[in-house]
Amino acid sequence: MPLYNDNRMLLGNAAHRALIAEGMQAIIHKEGFRVDTVAGVATAGIPHATSLANLINLPLIYVRSSPKEHGLKNQVEGILKTGQAVVVVEDLISTGGSAVKAVDAVREAGGVVEHCLGIFDYGFPEAKERFEKSQCRLHTLLNLDSLLQFAMKEGYLTSEEKPVVDAWMENPFEWGKSQGFDKIS
């Protein structure tokens, strides 16, 4: 892809982590949905879920990509009571696959999940379809359109470079092949 939003860079600064948690808290208050427990998607969602849970003084759980192969073989780790309203936290949403898989796992473990929070959303139709099918609303702090507007305004992205990003957005999962990136070993 011609650009990548690396949210892991936010982990190195306490003020940045706090800002993310405060933004997510603001979404919860603005939308007015109930939250009893915060769930982080392993691995990149866990630190932001932790910051949010600490800020709003709620329990934290986390969701593995698949059940653990030994021990209790849990996919959802932590204390989750049946019927608790859980908000799932992911850092980046591309196709929505890992986030929706986590939503499904929490539901299978007895939680009620109607909302997912993220830092960044590329806006791919696949993600929108997945969340709609899952009947889970996605809320993010930042999306690709607002990032590109900021990048253009601040000079990080030039008018000559913007068509490359636009071409990528038309078919993001085939764009790299057309640029010869499938031949890189």
Image (tube, rainbow, N blue to C red):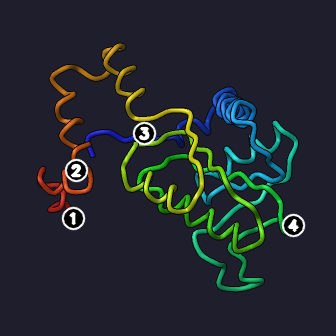
Cα separation between marks 1 and 2 = 22 Å
State which tag comes first along the sequence, 3 or 2.
Answer: 3
Q: What amino acid type should be assigned to the residue bearing mark 3?
A: Asn
Q: Check the picture and name the quadrant holding the C terminus.
A: bottom left
The residue depicted at 76 percent of the width and 65 percent of the height is 111
State which tag comes first along the sequence, 1 or 2.
Answer: 2
Q: In this rendering, is residue 143 above or below 37? A: above
- The extreme bottom residue here reads 70
Discs 1, 4 touching: Cβ within 8 Å: no
The residue depicted at 67 percent of the width and 64 percent of the height is 63
From the viewer's side, name the closer residue of 75 and 34.
Answer: 34
Instruction: Point out residue 148 in the picture as x, y percentages from the top left corner.
Output: 35, 27
- Residue to which mark 2 is pinned: 171
Choose top left, top right, bottom left or bottom right for residue 14. top right
Discs 3, 2 touching: Cβ within 8 Å: no
Cα separation between marks 2 and 4 = 42 Å
Between label 1 and label 2, give the one nearer the viewer.
2
Q: What amino acid type should be assigned to the residue bearing mark 2?
A: Asn
- Residue to which mark 4 is pinned: 81
Which element carries disc 4, helix, strand or loop? loop
Q: What amino acid type should be assigned to the residue bearing mark 1?
A: Ser
Which element carries disc 3, helix, strand or loop? loop
State which tag comes first along the sequence, 2 or 4.
Answer: 4
Left or right: 143 in relation to 21: left
Instruction: Point out residue 94 in the picture as x, y percentages from the top left corner.
Output: 42, 51
From the viewer's side, name the closer residue of 98 and 31.
Answer: 31
State which tag comes first along the sequence, 3 or 4.
Answer: 3
The residue depicted at 65 percent of the width and 84 percent of the height is 69
State which tag comes first along the sequence, 1 or 3.
Answer: 3
Q: What amino acid type should be assigned to the residue bearing mark 4?
A: Lys
The residue depicted at 42 percent of the width and 26 percent of the height is 146
Q: Determine which of the numbered discs, if any, sits on residue 185 in the image.
A: 1
